Image: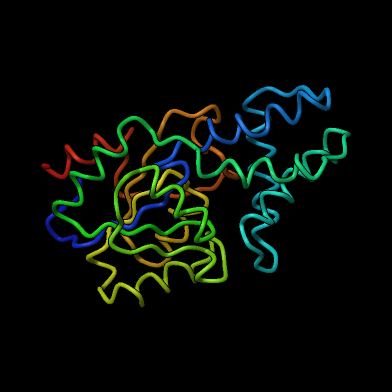
Amino acid sequence: MIDFDRFTHLTFDCYGTIIDWEAGILAAVGPVLERHGASLGEAELLQLYARFEAEQEAGEYKPYRQVLAAVMESMGTELGFTPSEADLLALPQSVGSWPPFSDSVEALQRLQMSFELVILSNIDDDLFAATERLLGLEFDEVITAQQVGSYKPSTRNFEIALERLQVPREKVLHVAQSLFHDHAPAKEMGFTTAWVNRPSRCPGVGVAPPTRCSPDLEVGDLRSLVQLAGL
């Protein structure tokens, strides 16, 4: 257990933690594969996505829209088809409609009564703006990969967060699903972290490469985090 009273800020990963990006990815990519006669199980598709996304984000920074288009192009190469221009736009155009998990909105509303809520996400500003409208709430601070010029698991994203928030890391709890993108770099930076280990078609890792990490707290959803915080 951790003492929630010592935190003033909760930093959140968004996609996979607040937003059900597995459902969003599958809804966007599935029809593309079907049009090209490619067949792949859901877990296999998500594992491919995770591999290609990590490859794209590890190189020189490019907007997430371009990352998503490149992921689709890599899928085509892997599965033996050439994506059309419309196919390449399928993922970036779908992000704003990726659904929140059923507990996300109410949990965030309750948490915001006691904490400053901050988004720390591998996303473009305009894509997150669509997600924020979908959630129907306003975060106290939004820090995107576009603003930082790098993608998690780079520790630079966490360094910039501390600079922007102007609070010591001891007062920040980082809340995220991905061990690879979030917990490993956050723990390296000395943050306390809460792992939202949501049910996944890729159990244990979700849509991310595997990694070893020891979060300070594990919950199955955000509703459980609210309960542990006593809200």
Location of residue 114 by image quarter:
bottom left
Viewport quadrant of the N terminus: top left
Q: Nearer the viewer, residue 178 or 109?
A: 109
Whether 43 is drawn above or below 147: the answer is above
> What colouring method underlies this structural image?
rainbow
Location of residue 135 by image quarter:
top left
Whether 207 is drawn above or below 212: the answer is above
Q: Nearer the viewer, residue 204 or 38?
A: 38
Residue 101, image x, y percentages: 38, 33
Q: Residue at x 65, y 67 (%)?
A: 61
Q: Residue at x 27, y 62 (%)?
A: 172
Q: Nearer the viewer, residue 13 or 133?
A: 133
In the image, 3: left or right of 21? left
In the image, 125: left or right of 196? right
Viewport quadrant of the C terminus: top left
In the image, 212: left or right of 90? left
Whether 101 is drawn above or below 108: the answer is above
Residue 14, image x, y percentages: 42, 48
Location of residue 67 by image quarter:
bottom right
Residue 93, image x, y percentages: 61, 44
Residue 115, image x, y percentages: 19, 56
Q: Nearer the viewer, residue 133 or 124?
A: 133
How many numbered tags mark residues here? Answer: 0
Q: Residue at x 51, y 58 (%)?
A: 126
Q: Residue at x 34, y 30 (%)?
A: 102
